[in-house]
Amino acid sequence: MEKARILIAEDEKNQRDLLEGFLKKEGFSVEAVANGREALQELEGNFFDVALIDYKMPELDGLQTLREIRNLYPDLPVVMMTAYGTVETAVASMKEGALDYLTKPIDLDELLLMLQKVIERSTLIRENKELRAQLQERYKFTHIVYGSPKMEEVMGLVARVAPSQTTVLIRGESGTGKELVANAIHYASPRSEKPWIKVSCAAIPETLLESELFGHERGAFTGATNRRIGRFEEADGGSIFLDEIGDLSPSTQVKLLRILQDKEFQRLGSNQSLKTDVRVITATHRNLEEAIQKGLFREDLYYRLNVISIVLPLLRERREDISLLIDYFLKKYSEENQKSISDISKEARSLLLRYPYPGNVRELENLIERAVVLCRGELITTQDLPFHLKEEKSEKLWESSKKEKSLPESLEEIEKDSILNALHQHQGVQTKAAERLGISERVLRYKMKKYRIRLHPPSLPLAKEQLEE
């Protein structure tokens, strides 16, 4: 394990040498300096876990040094050391941002215990920040794969909605990417560092869902031996994602409506109302308007949830994105299965591009994962794809999905797919793509503008994240 690094700023040489020697014997890496100015110079370009700063020093005293550290290195824990152990010096140090203080003569055992606690705390904070950064990067909406005009509209709406506090209803068939869009909204919002709680309303039995969402008191029902905190309490200050909201029972709908209206709820078995500050993001594949007509869903709740509605297109309605997703999943599952699969044959790619995908992006992901696992070489072929993709009925499904389109529209779609294929095969190099297509580069640029095909920056991969529910 790497040694923790301690910075000591102490003008008394004997005290400085004593602390430095003791901490080095205890296994720390130590840098000791004589004043605050030297401490700030030492911090430039170097990482320390803790700074021990003397309260009274020449040139730059302890409080001035502390202010500079808080300004330049706000995450660095600072412990003040003082021979003037008064309430005033302690309060002054804490007000300026010191984590703690020690009174001289320093009790070395007390110092050691304090350092261990401070380092554990700062390590935990640092790890949490790194985790949050990773999550934010993973779910950042700019990293979702899209090139089609329909997804341009969707992601433009996501970008405008994310910074607000409003309720969002995400609609779309299974596998279109509702949960990923919900992730993007939360992690691009001001609540991104607060709790992000997800609940699948369809996965929890109706008899348990109210307890799951709102919690319960001891004895509220048979088997309730202890008080339980609900998901809305856990999400306080952050966001909650209620997937398959159309499956809520009438009684749960009433309680959810109260939270949206009054920002308060009651645990099961309690008469006490509890306040909560939660942004609600919901999703459904059901037709809520039809459910309202049948008396299965409350109209007043619908209007509360449907402040902003984001409708996700089917994968077959944004075919321009299929090649992007194929390349992403190929890379992902090749790495996961430690295989060096470089590409997909033209025939296999053609089948994948023509298939109608009733299961949307999730189905495409499963197909690629299966193909990677079964592939024996470095190129996925039609032999690695399931039989139903090659059956005549697959062709019929594809034709039926296009039957309402005119001939010019169908020809344009084929032309667009061909351009996308050529660009992907040549990593976006337009000269080579134009040569493969048998057209001039000027004509290619015109077609790209016509079909709103945009290239990612050359330094970035064409596919960074998939849309999956």
Image (cartoon, rainbow, N blue to C red):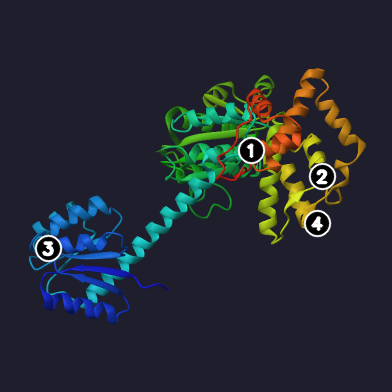
Q: Residue 233: horizontal and vertical position, in percent? A: 45, 44
Mark earlier in primary sequence (2, 3): 3
Q: Residue furthest bottom?
A: 25
Disc 3 element: loop
In the picture shown, does residue 282 fall above or below 95? above
Tag of residue 55: 3
Q: Which residue is disc 1 drawn over?
A: 177
Which of the 4 image quadrants contains residue 311?
Answer: top right
Mark earlier in primary sequence (1, 3): 3
Q: Amino acid at mark 4?
A: Leu
| Residue that appears at 52% across and 33% down | 256
Q: Which residue is disc 2 drawn over?
A: 348
Q: Residue 414: horizontal and vertical position, in percent? A: 78, 28
Looking at the rendered image, the disc whose residue lies closer to the viewer, 1 or 2, is: 2
Q: Amino acid at mark 2?
A: Ala
Q: Split into 4 quadrants, where in the image is the N terminus?
A: bottom left
Disc 2 element: helix
Q: Amino acid at mark 1?
A: Gly
Disc 1 element: loop
Q: Which residue is disc 4 drawn over?
A: 374
Q: Residue 362: horizontal and vertical position, in percent? A: 71, 42
Which of the 4 image quadrants contains residue 407?
Answer: top right
Mark earlier in primary sequence (1, 2): 1
